[in-house]
Image (tube, grey):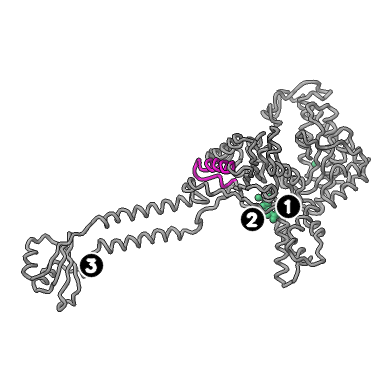
Amino acid sequence: MNPRDKRPGEKRTFGGGRPAGAVWYVLGFLLVMAIVQAYFVAPAGKPISYSEFKQAIRSGQVVEVFVGEQSIRGTYKKETNGGSSFTTSRIEDPKLIEDFDAAGVKYTGEFVSRWLPEVLGWIVPLLLLFGIWTFFLRRMGGAEGGVMSFARSKHRVFAEDDVKVSFADVAGVDEAEQELKEIVEFLRNPGKYTTLGGRIPKGVLLVGPPGTGKTLLARAVAGEAKVPFFSLSGSEFVEMFVGVGAARVRDLFQQAEAKAPCIIFIDELDALGRARAQGPMGSHEEREQTLNQLLAEMDGFDSRKAIIIMAATNRPEVLDPALLRPGRFDRQVLVDKPDVKGREEVLRIHTRNVKLAPAVSLRLIAARTAGFAGADLANLVNEAALLAARTDKVSVEAVDFEAAIDRLIAGLERKRVMSGKEREIVAYHESGHAIVATAIPGMDPVHKISIVQRGFGALGYTMQLPLEDRYLMQRGDLLNQLAVLLGGRTAEEIALGEISTGAQNDLQRATDIARAMVTEWGMSDVLGAINYDGHKRSKFLDIPVGPERGPYGEDTARIIDAEVKRIMTEAHNTARRLLTARRPLLDIVTRRLLEQEVMEGAELREILGAPPGAPEESPETTPRPPGVH
Ligand code: ADP
Ligand code: MG
Ligand code: ZN
């Protein structure tokens, strides 16, 4: 996992964790208010009582007075009080003017305009309130200014016009790269494809564990095609206020259309595209609206316009199925963790600017870092370089890499990097699937075997690609399929004399098939052609719905169980027979797999001496989902 990755749904807050900002805000306004008060409201001079004032007038100590509305300000004569000034409050006194005249005081009626202090007295608190209000709105509104950014959203999405990343910066994900080359080709030359009326893929979803280079690949596509690259994170769409995210999506597509050909990249799509009506917190109206807007835009824009929407996620299972429908993100590209060769290439890329000691073998480092993703390897190189620098070396040596690996593996331990023993078990298991699948004639050919740990829980996999679409399966086909499914576990039994928990999913699937053979497809001679489970399966999805058990009695249930068991045992025996006869080959395939971590179908068939098999993929048809065990 890449520690620099931002978690989906995590929000950055403006000025978060700095409450002092608010305090200064308030204090500033208070200060302004105090000054205003002092200037316009508070009287100047030494306050004296009215009787003192009268006394001073009568005794001729005063030169000049200003009679204000509520107060009287005056200045003493130089001789008496050094010419200082005073104030007193004004009291109803009809004889005041006579006194002034008698004492020979210069007097003026002062016209004080009251509107300024009064208006300020209103406005300052208002401003203050407004300031506090916007301040909190911003904090709530997340990233760049909450509601305020609604209008400004135009400036937020920034199109990188000249992306410097290319496929040369990405390694270890050759299959994904291969698929994306087609997109690059199209973006470079959209006319060529559209003049013939062809339609271009709209959405490409990069799926894979964190740190495998999904973001990097998307940028590389833009860099290779030399088109502008609009990049946003899914969480940036999800705002506090309903409608803002949707407006942002609309805006994004408008901008993109103006710049076509270009790429829109939505990173961490799961933050936005999580299946609707999920979660205990009631409806997520904002996210839903945003998602709907995205779907509408994707459906709406002219597919002849060369805009490719790419997205990345490491949690494809939570995505709303609507996103994966044809015309949306219907292309899915698996970006997997690299195998040993891939890791070596990734290391080569990241050590381009690192001074390596001559004895450093990247191959050896790659061999020691099973389970590392690209980002982990980049991290490793950096860590090793830092360690070397700390001890004032002139180049990074093998021991630095060793130390860095140890340190990183300790950190990765929680993420379960497989131990040597576990790798061996997985290798035997996958070899078992693959050998059984190849040994039985007429099975879907094995496309690839891998013991590279994947992010989705699988420790390894054997992938079979069907040669043709199949709508009907015969009983023999199903029995063979069961043998393949049980092949993994059987290989563990034969080679290691022990079975592991790794076969749980295989067993589940095998049992489902066996049960369906008995209860749904009438393939058991004992029970005959009766469907015992009714319409249990959803019409469009291959998932069981409704109650587990159909309307049958205890006796029938017992017979069903016995039949399922019999079929499973038969399949198990087939797998054991096939594998025992190929015992030395099982070891060879396993050892090869432990060395190189992945094996192509062709290589496997060569080892087994099987016919090379028909061409596996024809680009014209999308194969039905491959069987993965
Ligand atoms: P993701 O988006 O899949 O989580 P990133 O693309 O963000 O992974 O990868 C983070 C960094 O790790 C990249 O910037 C790059 O330096 C490095 N990296 C990851 N995968 C690869 C790879 N396949 N080849 C080269 N570098 C990689
Ligand atoms: Mg990423
Ligand atoms: Zn398996």
The image position of residue 385, as x and y in percent, is: 72, 65
Magenta-highlighted stretch: main secondary structure?
helix
14 left or right of 516 in image: left
Q: Secondary structure at mark 1?
A: loop
Look at label 3 and name its amino acid: Ala
Query: Residue 178: within the magenta?
Result: no
Judging by the rendered image, the residue that carries numbered circle 3 is: 44
Give the extent of the magenta segment.
234-257
Report how far apart the C-alphas of labels 1 and 3 lie in the structure: 76 Å
The image position of residue 181, as x and y in percent, is: 73, 44
Around disc 3, counting alpha carbons within 10 Å, would you say few (fewer than 14), some (14 to 19), or many (20 or more)?
some
Mark 2 C-beta closer than 8 Å to ligand 1 = yes
Badge 1 or badge 3: first in the primary sequence: 3
Look at label 2 and name its amino acid: Arg
Mark 3 C-beta closer than 8 Å to ligand 2 = no
Around disc 1, counting alpha carbons within 10 Å, would you say few (fewer than 14), some (14 to 19), or many (20 or more)?
many
The disc at residue 423 is none
Res. 129 in view: yes
Q: Secondary structure at mark 2?
A: loop
Judging by the rendered image, the residue that carries numbered circle 2 is: 4
* Pair 3/2: label in front: 3
